[in-house]
Image (cartoon, rainbow, N blue to C red):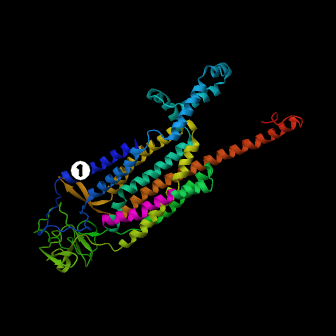
Amino acid sequence: MIGYGAILVALAGLLMTLPHFISEPYRYDNTSPGGISLTIKDPRWVGAWWLGFLIAAGSVALAAIPYFFFPKEMPKEKHELQFRRKVLAVTDSPARKGKDSPSKQSPGESTKKQDGLVQIAPNLTVIQFIKVFPRVLLQTLRHPIFLLVVLSQVCLSSMAAGMATFLPKFLERQFSITASYANLLIGCLSFPSVIVGIVVGGVLVKRLHLGPVGCGALCLLGMLLCLFFSLPLFFIGCPSHQIAGITHQTSAQPGPELFPSCMEVCSCPSDGFNPVCDPSTRVEYITPCHAGCSSRVVQDALDKSQVFYTNCSCVAEGNPVMAGSCDSTCSHLVVPFLLLVSLGSALACLTHTPSFMLILRGVKKEDKTLAVGIQFMFLRILAWMPSPVIHGSAIDTTCVHWALSCGRRAVCRYYNNDLLRNRFIGLQFFFKTGSVICFALVLAILRQQDKEARTKESRSSPAVEQQLLVSGPGKKPEDSRV
C-alpha cells in the first residue's frame, strides 16, 4: 500500500506540471517602446516553476520501487497474529466460559475483558468499527492531556503551514531578493534546523528518561525559547520603496506630484507594469511612461545588458532611469532574519517527540491507534487547511497597489513592507503563544496528577506497614503479600 500511495503522489506531481505544457506562452504588457527586458530580479519573472514538481515526482516514484519487493506480511507481525488468534481461541473455549461465568464476574471485569477482546481482535468489520468509533472518539476527546497537546500541535502546524506557503514570498518582497535565492536560503537553513530540532528532542527524551512531567516541561521550555527568539523578527526588515504616485513622498523627492502635467501627453495605461528606478533619488516608477520617458537606450556589457530610459519629463533634471525595481539598501539583513527563523523552528521542533509521547502515554492502550488518527485529522482540518488562507488574507491587507485584470484585482504589485512584516510575524507570534498556553496547562495538569499520585502512595504506605506487622513473623511471606 505504501508503494501504491507513493506512485499516486508521483502522478499528482506530474499533473501539477501539465499547465506548463498545455497553456499559452506567457504574455506581458507592452507599455514601452522596445518591449520589456526581464531579469531574475524582476517580480514578474516566472522561470521554470514546473521543474521542481517534475524532479520531486520522479524522486518519489523511484523511492516507491523498493516497497513492491516487501512481503505481504512481515514475519514478526505474522507470529503476533497467530498468538492473538490462540488467545482468542483460549478465551472463547467452553472450559474457559464455564470457569469464568458471568455470575462470577463483576461488571468492571467484564468491561475490561470486552475492551481487551476489541484490542486483540485480528480483523474488525466496517460495521463493528462504526459502532465502536463514536464511543472511543468521545472518550479520547474528554481526556484533557490529549486535547491540550493536540491543540498545541494545531497551533504549531498552523505556524508551519503559513511559513511553508508564504515565507519565500515574504523574503522576496521584504528584502528585495530573487525568488530562487529566497528558496535556496530556506532550503539551506530552515529545513536542516527542523530536522536537528526533531532529532535533539528525541535524544533528550531518551537520554534523560523523561516521564510525562518531564516531557511537558521540555515542550514548554522549547516553546518559550522559540517565542523569545521571535521578538527580534518584528524589527528586522526593510522599509517600503518610494513609488511615484503611490506612496507618500516628501517635497525633496521628485515625482508626478511635482510635475502634474508631465504625463498628460503620454496617456499611460492604468494597468501597465514595467518598473523603472531613478538611481539618484531611489524613486521607483510603475512604467517608463509614468516617468515621462520618450526614448530607450541599451548598454551592452560582458555578462549582461542594462536598459535605460532617457528624456524623462517626470524626473528631476531629466535624469535617465534604469529598467527594473530599485535595489534595497538592507538586503543583507535577510541572513540574520532567516537564522533567527531557523533557530525558532529548531526550538519549536524540540516539542515533536515529547508531545507525541504525551499522547501515547495519556490514552488507553486499546485507543492509541485511533488517538493518533484523530490527532492527524485535527491537524489537517484545523491547521493545514485554514492556515494558508488566514496568512494569505492577512498579507493581502498590506497591499498598496493592485494590478487589475478585466476590472478585478489580479496580483499585488507593491506592499507596505512594515505592515507586511508586522502582520506576518504577528500571526506567527499568535500561534506560538497559543502553543505555549496549551503546554503550560498540560504541565500544570500533569503536576497536579503527579501530586495526587504521591499523596495516595503516602497514605497507603502506613496501612501496608501496619498489615505487615499484624501478620506476624510466623506467617509465610506469601500470606502477608499485599
User: Residue 475, how many percent across, how many down?
Assistant: 87, 34
- Magenta span: chief secondary structure: helix
Position of 68 compared to 137: left or right? left
Looking at the rendering, the stretch of residues picked out in magenta corresponds to: 178-198
Q: Is residue 457 above or below residue 413?
A: above
Q: Position of residue 472 (x, y in %)?
A: 88, 36
Q: Nearer the viewer, residue 201 or 443?
A: 201
Q: Position of residue 4 (x, y in %)?
A: 36, 43
Q: Can you give x and y, in whole percent of width and height, for residue 259 in the image? A: 18, 73
The residue under label 1 is which amino acid type?
Leu
Magenta includes 191? yes
Q: Which element type, helix, strand or loop, lies under badge 1?
A: helix
Q: Residue furthest bottom?
A: 317
Say if residue 84 shows up in the picture. yes
Reading the image, the residue beneath label 1 is 18
For the C terminus, the quadrant is top right
Pick whichever, 405 or 123, lies toward us.
123
Q: Residue 364 appears in which quarter of the rendering?
A: top right
Question: Relative to residue 369, is residue 15 drawn left or right?
Answer: left
Q: In the orientation shown, which residue stands out farthest toward the left?
A: 265
Q: Residue drawn at (21%, 79%), measured in percent from left and top? A: 302
Answer with the quarter of the image where residue 420 lies: bottom left
Residue found 49% across the figure and 52% down from its top:
434
